[in-house]
């Protein structure tokens, strides 16, 4: 009996051997800064060569890889991962007195934040600990989520980096939507954020933390354990709150050399105050498939005392018949999504193909603090834009080495990192709160 207790099944892997395997993989790819990318080796093939060595790793993000500048896009992570591609949709959430229409408005904004994933796949700079980013959007007060008549879509990186408006004190009859975010952890990489429009009494808060895995055919990016969703609160409607979970993305096209993001699995939006919920179900696309739609969903009323948090695990087929369906929606998340309320005609919920990423207002570099994203990364980004990638990689390496030195100093002194903008007790709820005296440089 004692003998058999020590026998390891042939197909099983012990925790120690798995840790050793991942350590060996880290040693194999850990010196990615030494990779040279030239005319004979495209950016795509260089990334693929790295990822092939990581097949089977549970979470690539947790390995803290440092990629050479040639494989990155010249945009800071905190700036890239924002959810205000269309701030008009965010403001429109507050407008209707009909609770179902407010849920549909939340849903439209939720789809609008996926706009960055409809174009080229980007890899921004990894944030340093304590890094922060501030910006705002000035939105006409008459604008609504359905008013866009833009006929073309801008590339995410160019919109974020070059098409930036300069904020003024005279915004006329415009409403201001603000974005405040800070990198609150480096291992694992976690950031806290707040969006708010004080004039309309709406805010959205949450924690960004992702995990990634490469299978050889696709790279899957999903919310990490710290990410509980986006929490949208309407203060002028009795603090009506919507919890919106993030979808899982699949980066496909590695064999063809043309990368594309597909959304897979399920997401949901829940409003406990109104008793309304929405389940969003993505259909995994196949290159040989002729399916016309890749997303569908339902908005329904649910009994909070009976179902509670069970909705988080529901697919569309799991919605009980006792839940009253008030609207159905579907289409293509990267093109058009239509909605039909019960006993009403079908209408457009959102036209993703007609949206363009809104220009943000950011303070000039000389007015930014040392830890603000563009101030931190502009020395690297400017070299990249000039095509001086060797210099860019050296500058990037110096920034990262400085972070290691600071981390070692904190460890030696027995000091924990303390966020400058947010209260430290954000982890359990996933709803960070700004400090009353947070140094916001808007």
Image (cartoon, rainbow, N blue to C red):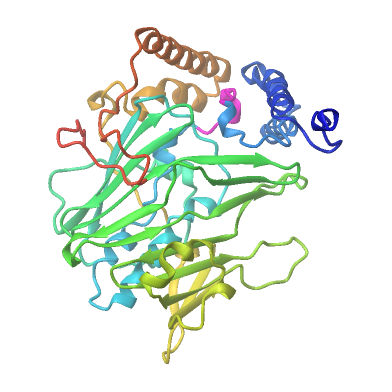
Q: Point out residue 330 in the picture as x, y percentages from the top left corner.
A: 53, 74
Q: Horizontal and vertical percent for residue 440?
A: 21, 34
Residue 379's spot in the image, x, y percent?
A: 42, 20
Give the left or right position of residue 381, taking residue 290 as reference.
left
Q: For residue 360, which quarter of the picture?
A: top left
Residue displayed at 43% across by 55% down: 113
Is residue 361 rendered to the left or right of residue 374? left
Instruction: Say if residue 173 shows up in the picture.
Output: yes
Q: Residue at x 57, y 33 (%)?
A: 61
Q: Is residue 80 magenta?
A: no
Q: Is residue 390 above or below residue 15?
A: above
Which image quadrant: the N terminus? Answer: top right
The residue under the point 73% across, 36% down is 55
Give 207 or 403, whichever is nearer the viewer.
Answer: 207
Which image quadrant is residue 9 in?
top right
Q: Nearer the viewer, residue 15 or 315?
A: 15
Q: Nearer the viewer, residue 25 or 292?
A: 25
Where is residue 276 drawn, in percent x and y? 37, 73
Q: Quadrant of the C terminus?
A: top left
Most common secondary structure along the magenta stretch? loop
Q: Is residue 422 left or right of residue 170?
A: right
Kindly tell me whether residue 355 is visible in this rendering. Answer: no
In this rendering, would 236 be left or right of 266? left
Q: Which residues are magenta?
A: 64-73
Q: Residue at x 51, y 25 (%)?
A: 384
**Label total for image:** 0
Placement of 182 over or under 16, stated as above or below: below
138 above or below 280? above
Residue sitting at the far front: 1
């Amino acid at each position: 009996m004692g003998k058999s207790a020590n026998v390891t099944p042939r197909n099983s892997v012990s925790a120690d051997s798995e840790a050793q395997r991942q350590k060996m993989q880290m040693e194999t790819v850990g010196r990615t800064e030494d990779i040279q990318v030239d005319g004979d080796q495209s950016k795509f093939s260089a990334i693929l060569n790295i990822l092939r060595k990581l097949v089977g790793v549970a979470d690539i993000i947790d390995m803290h890889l440092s990629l050479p500048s040639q494989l990155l896009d010249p945009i800071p992570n905190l700036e890239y991962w924002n959810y205000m591609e269309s701030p008009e949709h965010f403001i429109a959430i507050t407008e209707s007195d009909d609770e179902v229409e407010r849920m549909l408005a939340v849903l439209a904004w939720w789809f609008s934040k996926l706009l960055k994933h409809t174009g080229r796949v980007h890899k921004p700079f990894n944030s340093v600990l304590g890094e922060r980013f501030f910006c705002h959007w000035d939105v006409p007060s008459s604008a609504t989520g359905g008013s866009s008549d833009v006929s073309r879509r801008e590339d995410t990186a160019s919109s974020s980096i070059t098409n930036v408006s300069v904020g003024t004190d005279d915004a006329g009859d415009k409403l201001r939507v603000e974005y405040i975010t800070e990198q609150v952890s480096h291992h694992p990489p976690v950031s806290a954020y707040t969006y708010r429009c004080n004039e309309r009494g709406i805010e959205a808060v949450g924690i960004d933390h992702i995990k990634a895995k490469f299978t050889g055919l696709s790279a899957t990016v999903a919310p990490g354990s710290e990410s509980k969703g986006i929490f949208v609160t309407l203060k002028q409607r009795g603090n009506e709150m919507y919890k919106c979970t993030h979808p899982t993305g699949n980066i496909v096209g590695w064999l063809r050399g043309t990368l594309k993001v597909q959304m897979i699995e399920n997401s949901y939006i829940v409003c406990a105050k109104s008793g309304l919920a929405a389940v969003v179900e993505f259909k995994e696309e196949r290159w040989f498939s002729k399916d016309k739609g890749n997303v569908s969903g339902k908005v329904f009323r649910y009994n909070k005392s009976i179902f509670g948090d069970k909705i988080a695990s529901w697919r569309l087929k799991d919605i009980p018949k006792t839940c009253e369906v008030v609207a159905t929606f579907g289409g293509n998340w990267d093109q058009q999504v239509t909605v039909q309320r019960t006993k009403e005609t079908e209408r457009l919920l959102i036209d993703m193909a007609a949206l363009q990423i809104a220009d943000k207002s950011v303070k000039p570099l000389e007015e930014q603090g040392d830890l603000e994203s563009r101030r931190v990364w502009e020395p690297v980004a400017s070299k990249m834009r000039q095509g001086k990638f060797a210099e860019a990689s050296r500058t990037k390496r110096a920034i990262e080495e400085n972070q290691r030195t600071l981390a070692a100093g904190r460890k030696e002194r027995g000091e924990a990192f303390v966020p400058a903008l947010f209260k430290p007790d954000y982890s359990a709820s996933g709803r960070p709160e700004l400090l009353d005296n947070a140094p916001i440089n808007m």
